[in-house]
């Protein structure tokens, strides 16, 4: 094996930890403000981050060369997604919000992967500083840990594209700017801007600053941690409607949102994925509205609002839920389950298989069927009037296959811990798509009570969340034998 | 098509033998059914004997689907005529389950049926399990059908062991001879092992075709362990590619050596699964070693080859074991065998393809083709396999949902969808184990029959009929 750039790996991980230490300032301030007694524990975990970060960055990773190849970029991605969530679990332990390391790790991984599955029974009872920390983990994870550093590291210019594609694997990304660091920083800017707008709107709608902040971060990152015990039931209608809009937006490709905010409206129409996304959203919401109304016997605005909220929450894999209508029609379950698998647009903060991939596959399938009848016809798969190369279609197929394998494998392990087969599939699908909680799972009879799951189940779900967030390849690459083979 | 019907009528005529022998009073009805089928078959054959040349691919797809539909239509006759079941829906379900060699039954107490009907059930499986298309090809080469396109319609996708034979008819004859030889051999072996001839014939018919109907309500649970192992052997052989079997039995081992990849994977999968299931049975469910090994082996083989003979109610086992059996059924046997499911060959290609994609991402400049049997698999085939996998997964998912819409609960819907689509048979819950599908609503039954047809014809053949372009000039 050629020289493997361990130092760079250490340096970058160290920098991530320092960033986290920086992010810890906010929870500490909040903690001091509310005098919730968690300030020392939070400060202590901040110090641990600083110490670990300095150790990795300046001691192990000193004089690191910034040369980066494909292999190291996978390794960095995997390590970053291992070290950061585990370190992020420390505050939960120090403040006593969660008792065991498994629980803390679960909550942290669920946060960073923007899944939103929570083991905290009553979030209102933990220190306010921890609530803020929980939201921040989601917000950092939303666009991706690696993107966080790529934006700041001008020196990485060579390797940043590889890092970028290791984390955002599988989808053909149109870059916002020829220079990768620039385009990433644009993504961060638009992301922050949307968050800011949302938080302001929520405050204007009459929520407390703390709630607005937590909800804003959970929504824009499509995470789905909720600051109260009973889902979103306690919030005003206005608040929920605002959230619906922003959940919908956070399922859109970030690059496209940038165009939206710079008033290049025509891009929206040209982007077939967006058109499909909006179409699916409207169709699903309206059909659910009809289903709910018929099942419950009233065509009320409340039902419409609920349908829009629920579908937006599902398609963007955000995972908020409110009190649902008393009768949960079967059609709503079907739609919800399908949306869990399809997920949001490629290049958004949402999870799932991504619509762009499914578009490619369905076009290929149509061509295949036509070829069965007319064997000599030659087709190309086109999206947005551009041909998708055959090799790329093959990659998408491979991805979908592995995705399904992970769901099956995850469900298999879950059955060891006493879940029924149907429950196991639901849990596995909801967590690999980074959805987290959903009323669907309740309606099928499984329990949303992640806290009651045994340890093995929790670790399995964590792996599924990571696999879903890293789109499998980065995770699988580092454990595959050929990765470590000398060449 | 007429010829196939006549053959079916002939087979139905064979059912007269037990009817007369056991004198259970159904002989007259069966004879009437057989006569009707033969007459219809003759009529069709006579009417259309001049235009039998099929050049169009579209026609061959349509023909295959129609064949199965017509066959099960006529297969319902004995059930209805003898009064075994009164509604057409249940008769259709049973007939479809027979000709697609699924083995899902709507009779909770099989023992109560007249013996002619029992034999008929076994016969439909034996007949259907092998694929009627193959029979057509073997018996009437002068029919002039474009054999290749018909053959691909039946066993679409990855069956390159069979397809590479230039003369398809020869392949089919070989396959048929292996099939017949195996059937006769197993009947004799079972007879020698102390089983009654009646049971031996029926069980061989249903197990060699990977069907899974039985003449007893408790499937194969009450026969002796030795006989169960023999049947497991029959099932295992039914999951092996028939071309390989032919080469093996004619001692052309040198030719086999280059085609071992699929077989190795099949056997490996089988051994691992058996080991796992036996392990859980012994350590978790508390069976003794001999019971655990027997039940585990037979049931696992039955699942992997999508036979569906039940030696113990696996729905009562530990959930991981039940789960694994379902997954094995989805995986299925080898391509070019009588089994259903995805086929081991495809799973192998899918796995190797993901490996190659992975390597490609790590080392973008290295060429990594998918290899099978020592040679590279073209990306065209890989993508086709992928498409079939996707469609299979999609249908499975939609199937579960539609079944739930028909009022089946979630667990049972998963079981039934897997059971019907893969041709395994028993599902989960009340329809699993020794149970039956009798409590399903008629909508659910019709849908299950559709799933069986889809699974047997490997989805694409049926789906292509729904394409608007298919019907356009």
Image (spheres, grey):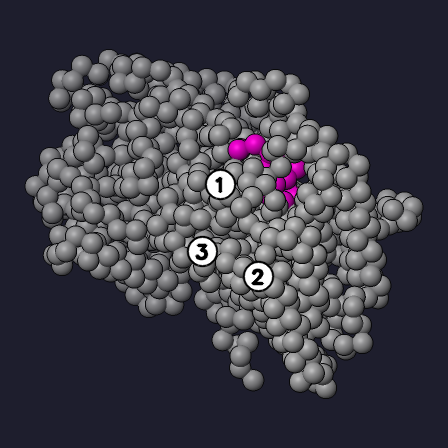
Both marks 2 and 3 on one chain: yes
User: Which quarter of the figure is the N terminus of chain A placed in?
Assistant: top right
Q: What is the secondary structure assignment of the residue under circle 2?
A: helix
The first of marks 1 and 3 along the sequence is: 1
From which residue to which does the magenta span run? B299-314
x and y percentages locating residue A131 in the rendered image:
23, 27
Report in which chain the residue with disc 3 lies. Answer: B
Residue A411 lies, with reference to residue B172, above or below; the image says: above
Residue at the spot of label 1: B435
The residue that label 3 is drawn on is: B445
Residue indicated by mark 2 = B78
Q: How crowded is mark 3: few (under 14 residues within 10 Å), some or many (20 or more)?
A: many
Q: How far apart are marks 1 and 2 (CA)?
A: 23 Å
Can residue A428 be seen from the camera position used here?
Answer: no
Tell me the CA gap for discs 1 and 3: 15 Å
Q: Residue at x 51, y 65 (%)?
A: A363
Mark 1 vs mark 2: in front? 2
Question: In the rendered structure, does residue A243 fall within the stretch colored magenta?
Answer: no
Cα separation, mark 2 vs mark 3, equals 19 Å
Q: Where is A148 relative to B132, above or below?
A: above
Residue in front for this viewpoint, B456 or A94: B456
Number of marks in the image? 3
């Amino acid at each position: 094996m050629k020289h493997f750039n361990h130092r760079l790996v250490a340096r970058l991980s160290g920098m991530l930890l320092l960033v986290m230490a920086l992010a810890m300032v906010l929870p500490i301030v909040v903690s001091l403000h509310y005098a919730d007694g968690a300030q020392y524990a939070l400060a202590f975990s901040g110090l641990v981050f600083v110490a670990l970060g300095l150790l990795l960055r300046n001691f192990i990773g000193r004089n690191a060369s910034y040369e980066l190849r494909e292999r190291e970029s996978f390794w960095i991605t995997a390590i970053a997604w291992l070290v950061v969530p585990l370190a992020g679990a420390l505050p939960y332990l120090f403040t006593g919000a969660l008792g065991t390391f498994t629980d803390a790790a679960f909550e942290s991984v669920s946060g960073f992967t923007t899944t939103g599955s929570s083991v905290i029974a009553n979030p209102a009872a933990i220190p306010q500083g921890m609530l803020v920390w929980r939201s921040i983990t989601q917000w950092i994870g939303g666009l991706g840990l690696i993107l966080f550093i790529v934006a700041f590291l001008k020196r990485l210019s060579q390797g940043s594209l590889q890092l970028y594609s290791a984390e955002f694997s599988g989808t053909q990304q149109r870059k916002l700017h020829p220079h990768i660091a620039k385009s990433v920083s644009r993504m961060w800017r638009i992301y922050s801007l949307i968050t800011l707008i949302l938080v302001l709107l929520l405050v204007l709608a009459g929520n407390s600053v703390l709630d607005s902040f937590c909800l804003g971060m959970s929504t824009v990152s499509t995470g789905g941690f909720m600051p109260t015990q009973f889902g979103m039931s306690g919030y005003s209608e206005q608040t929920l409607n605002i959230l619906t809009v922003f959940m919908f937006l956070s399922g859109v490709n970030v690059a496209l949102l940038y165009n939206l905010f710079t008033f290049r409206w025509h891009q929206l129409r040209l982007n077939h994925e967006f058109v499909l996304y909006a179409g699916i959203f409207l169709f699903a919401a309206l059909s659910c509205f009809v289903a709910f109304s018929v099942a419950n016997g009233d065509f009320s605005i409340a039902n419409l609002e609920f349908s829009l909220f629920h579908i937006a929450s599902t398609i963007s894999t955000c995972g908020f839920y409110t009190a649902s209508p008393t009768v949960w029609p079967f059609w709503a379950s079907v739609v919800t389950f399908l949306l869990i698998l399809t997920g949001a647009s490629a290049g958004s903060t949402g999870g799932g298989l991504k619509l762009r991939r499914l578009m490619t596959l369905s076009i290929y399938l149509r061509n295949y069927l036509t070829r069965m009848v007319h064997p000599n016809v030659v087709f190309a798969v086109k999206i947005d009037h551009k041909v998708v190369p055959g090799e790329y279609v093959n990659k998408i197929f491979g991805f979908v296959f592995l995705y399904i394998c992970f769901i099956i494998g995850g469900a298999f392990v879950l059955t060891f811990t006493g879940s029924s087969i149907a429950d196991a599939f639901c849990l596995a699908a909801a967590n690999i798509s980074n959805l987290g909680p959903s009323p669907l799972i309740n309606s099928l009879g499984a329990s949303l009570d992640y806290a009651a799951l045994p340890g093995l189940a929790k670790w399995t779900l964590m792996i599924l969340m990571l696999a879903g967030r890293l789109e499998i390849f980065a995770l699988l690459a580092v454990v595959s034998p050929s990765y470590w083979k000398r060449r | 098509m007429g010829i196939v019907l006549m053959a079916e009528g002939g087979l139905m005529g064979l059912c007269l033998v037990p009817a007369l022998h056991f004198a259970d009073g159904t002989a007259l009805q069966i004879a009437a059914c057989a006569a009707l089928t033969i007459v219809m078959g003759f009529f069709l054959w006579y009417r259309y004997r001049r235009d039998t040349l099929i050049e169009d691919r579209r026609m061959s797809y349509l023909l295959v689907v129609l064949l199965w539909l017509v066959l099960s239509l006529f297969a319902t006759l004995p059930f209805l005529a003898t009064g075994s079941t009164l509604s057409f829906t249940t008769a259709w379900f049973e007939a479809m389950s027979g000709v697609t060699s699924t083995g899902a039954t709507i009779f909770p107490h099989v023992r109560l049926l007249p013996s002619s009907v029992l034999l008929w059930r076994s016969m439909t499986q034996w007949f259907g399990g092998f694929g009627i298309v193959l029979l057509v090809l073997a018996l009437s080469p002068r029919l002039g059908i474009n054999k290749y396109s018909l053959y691909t319609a039946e066993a679409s996708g990855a069956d390159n062991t069979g397809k590479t034979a230039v003369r398809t008819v020869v392949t089919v004859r070989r396959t048929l001879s292996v099939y017949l030889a195996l059937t006769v051999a197993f009947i004799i072996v079972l007879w020698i092992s102390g089983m009654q001839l009646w049971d031996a014939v029926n069980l061989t018919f249903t197990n060699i075709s990977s069907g899974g109907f039985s003449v007893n309500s408790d499937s194969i649970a009450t026969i002796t362990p030795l006989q169960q192992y023999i049947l497991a052997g029959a099932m295992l052989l039914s999951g092996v590619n028939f071309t390989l079997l032919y080469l093996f039995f004619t001692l052309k081992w040198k030719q086999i050596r280059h085609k071992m990849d699929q077989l190795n994977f099949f056997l490996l999968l089988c051994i691992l699964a058996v080991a796992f299931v036996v392990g859980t049975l012994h350590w978790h469910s508390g069976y003794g070693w001999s019971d655990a090994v027997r039940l585990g082996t037979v049931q696992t083989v039955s699942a992997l080859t999508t036979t569906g003979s039940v030696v113990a109610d696996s729905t009562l086992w530990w959930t991981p074991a039940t789960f694994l059996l379902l997954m094995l059924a989805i995986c299925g046997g080898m391509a070019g065998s009588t089994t259903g499911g995805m086929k081991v060959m495809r799973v192998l290609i899918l796995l190797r393809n993901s490996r190659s994609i992975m390597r490609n991402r790590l080392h973008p400049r290295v060429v990594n083709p998918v290899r099978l049997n020592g040679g590279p698999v073209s990306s065209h085939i890989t993508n086709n396999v992928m498409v079939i996998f996707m469609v299979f997964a999609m249908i499975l998912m939609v199937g579960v949902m539609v079944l739930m819409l028909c009022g089946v609960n979630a667990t049972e819907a998963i079981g039934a969808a897997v059971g019907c689509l893969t041709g395994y048979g028993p599902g989960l819950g009340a329809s699993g184990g020794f149970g039956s599908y009798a409590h399903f609503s008629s909508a659910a039954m019709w849908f299950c029959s559709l799933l069986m047809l889809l699974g047997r014809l490997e989805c694409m053949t049926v789906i292509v009929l729904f394409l608007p372009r298919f019907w356009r000039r």
